[in-house]
Image: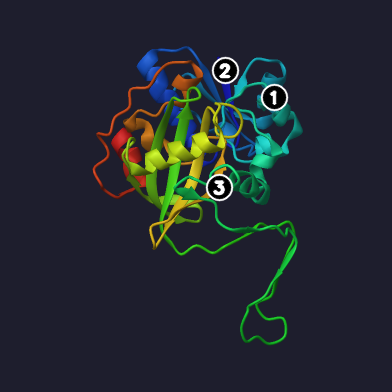
Amino acid sequence: MNFVVFESGSRAGLSAELFFESYISATGAQHQLFLSDLDTDFQHIVSRHPQVHLIHDSQAFKMLEAGEAVIFPADELTRQSNSDAYKIAMKRSFSSVLPFFYNKMQMNDYLSHLVTNCVIEIPETFYLSDVCVKPNSKSAGSRNIQFLDNACVMQKIDIDHEFVVDVLRYNDEKMYIFPREVTLKNGYDRFIKLLPLDGVLAEHVAEFVKAACPKNDGMFSDIFHLQLCQDKSGNFYYIEFSKRISGTSCVNIMSGMSPFALIDGKDLQVSNAMIDGTWRRFEDFLLMMH
């Protein structure tokens, strides 16, 4: 099978490549991975792996439209915003997306009715999309006033811990959960602490996923990740989700995460060996793998 990854100049593109190399090394599968990006300089980079190819988006679409490849879910925007990519992605459950997945206000409303008995809560959300935000205190003129169009306004959480959780779901009941605590910089995991695959947070995630999506179909199906937080009182909150691998999900390779194995219908051999309570830089994981 040929796989195409859009927006491959990102960390998610790197994670897809590392997952692919690990899977090919373990199984000897003859799949080919085509890493694609709109930047014309990207295709001049040469991969070290003979089954990995770097191309431009125009070439990727020719392959996909000819039925010569499928989309691997690592991109953030292409499947949502490009109508051609959207149609192709919808042909496979692991790459399919729906517009409401990315409407944060609509998603919070939808989930809030389904997960009322879960430990992980949905933040209080105010259902006004076009808002004027102004300080509820002394102010002069229009200082500190914001006018926002198509915004999702939620309660401010006093965040104490932040988490990213990658999930590979095989069927209605069976899923592998790979949680990590993170500190973020510019939206990327800066420091990472892997958490037990069968620990308390993983149990909360399994409860949340099954309450919101009992069947392995739709938003919480196949390959996806969640962003969560915990406040200073110990309460857990849902922030958002994406139906793709997370950008730095490659840190889970040594724990047994393998999205290509899921796509091929092969089971995983997971391990808590790396779960030692240690904080590491993202780059430390790359050094350990290579």
- Looking at numbered disc 1 in the image, what kind of residue is underneath it? Ile
Image position, residue 136 (x, y; %) = 63, 79
Percent position of residue 89, x then y? 66, 27
Q: Is residue 191 left or right of 73 when viewed as pictured?
A: left
Would you place residue 145 above or below residue 41 in this image? below
| Secondary element type, mark 2 | strand
CA gap between label 2 and label 1 equals 14 Å
Where residue 135 appears, x then y in whole percent? 63, 78
x and y percentages locating residue 240 in the rendered image: 55, 47
The label shown at residue 146 is: none
Amino acid marked by disc 3: Glu
Which residue matches tag 3? 240
Q: Label 2 belongs to which residue?
A: 2
Mark 1 is surrounded, within 10 Å at the Cα level, by few (under 14), some (14 to 19) or many (20 or more) other residues, namely: some
Q: Which residue is at the front of the view, 167 or 245? A: 167
Instruction: Determine the residue positioned at 50% across, 29% down.
Output: 46
**Secondary structure of the residue carrying numbered label 1:** helix
Quadrant of the image occupied by residue 218: top right
- Residue at 32% in and 33% down: 289
Up the image or down, 160 lies above or below 65; here it is: below
* Image quadrant where one finds the C terminus: top left
Of residues 179 and 21, the one nearer the viewer is: 179
Which residue is label 1 attached to? 88
